[in-house]
Amino acid sequence: MINSSSSKGNSATSAGRIAGPLCLVLGLLLVLASFGGAWGPAYGQTVVTPTPPTLVADPRIVKLVDPGCCIPGDDVTFTIIVTNEGSADAHNVVVTDTLPAELVLLDVTTSKGTVTIDGNSFQVDIGTVSPGEVVTIIVQARVLEDTPVDIIIINVARMRSDEGSGEASVEFPVKEACETPSELPPTGSTMAQPSAGFRPGLLLAGLLLLVLGTGLNLRARRLGRSTDA
């Protein structure tokens, strides 16, 4: 005659021995997955080594004007910004500019390079601009007293280098009177976003499965000992 309690104990023990390790494995996988891809190289995932990018220079030029409106006799400041957004040095960088006839050139300064002034024209020999480097050129000028009002003054700065060329322009009106722009209200602060690599939900589920798997293993061992006895 088959002992039913012994049979049930053996079935429970077998089920626990299967379910316990399975929960432990799934729990461990979920815990690892909750930390994103940082665990991949340590656990046998294929790591693809990217091909090193080709180093290329990318010089850029930007020009700004202040104020944005003038009356005859006003001083005006132009700011020329030269950058290199590439991954290699830009060589023999030169900036040239000729102010229109309504302006008189007062002074030119640069954060790098040498300045040559000839009347209303100037040239800045910058030389080499490294990746990420910023070169700032400040141009001081004045609107002539006899400049007619209700006109638009346009000024263009040009840049050339061994790797390419570009230009940047600004324009501003000359009026009898300029309105003072109202200050814009401050914008709201930007809240930091949580890291996308960590997943707390997966971590919690993995830990629960680890606890469950451990409990099933212990229960299966106790049932196995009682059945043997």
Image (tube, rainbow, N blue to C red):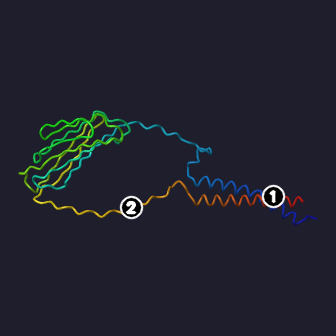
Residue at image mark 1: 221
Label 2 sits on residue: 189
Circle 2 SS class: loop
Q: Is residue 121 left or right of residue 113?
A: left
> Which label sits on residue 66?
none
Q: Dot 1 lies on which element?
A: helix
Residue kind at label 2, given as amino acid type:
Ser
Quadrant of the image for the C terminus? bottom right
Give the mark nearest the N terminus, 1 or 2: 2
Q: Are marks 1 and 2 in contact (CB under 8 Å)?
A: no
Q: Is residue 192 left or right of residue 212?
A: left
Q: Mark 2 packing: few (<14 Cα in 10 Å), some, or many (20+)? A: few
The relative height of residue 220 versus residue 131 in the rendered view (above or below) is below
Residue 137's place in the image compared with 204, above or below, is above
Residue furthest to the right: 1
Per the model, the C-alpha gap separating discs 1 and 2 is 58 Å
Q: Residue furthest bottom?
A: 4
* Between marks 1 and 2 in the image, the one whose residue lies nearer the viewer: 2
The crowding category of the residue bearing disc 1, from other C-alpha atoms within 10 Å (few below 14, some 14 to 19, many at least 20), is: some
Q: Tell me which amino acid carries mark 1.
A: Arg
Q: Relative to 142, is 200 on the left or the right? A: right
User: In the rendered picture of this protein, how many numbered marks are placed on residues?
Assistant: 2
Pinpoint residue 159: horizontal percent, then vertical percent.
24, 39
Residue shown at 18%/35% (left/top)? 116
Q: Is residue 128 left or right of residue 157?
A: right
Instruction: Name the residue rendered at 60%, 58% in the picture.
Output: 203
Residue 99 location in percent, x, y? Answer: 15, 44
In the rendered view, tell whether residue 33 sits above or below residue 133: below
When asked about the image quadrant of residue 92, the answer is top left
x, y percent for residue 144: 9, 49
Residue 55, image x and y in percent?
A: 39, 36
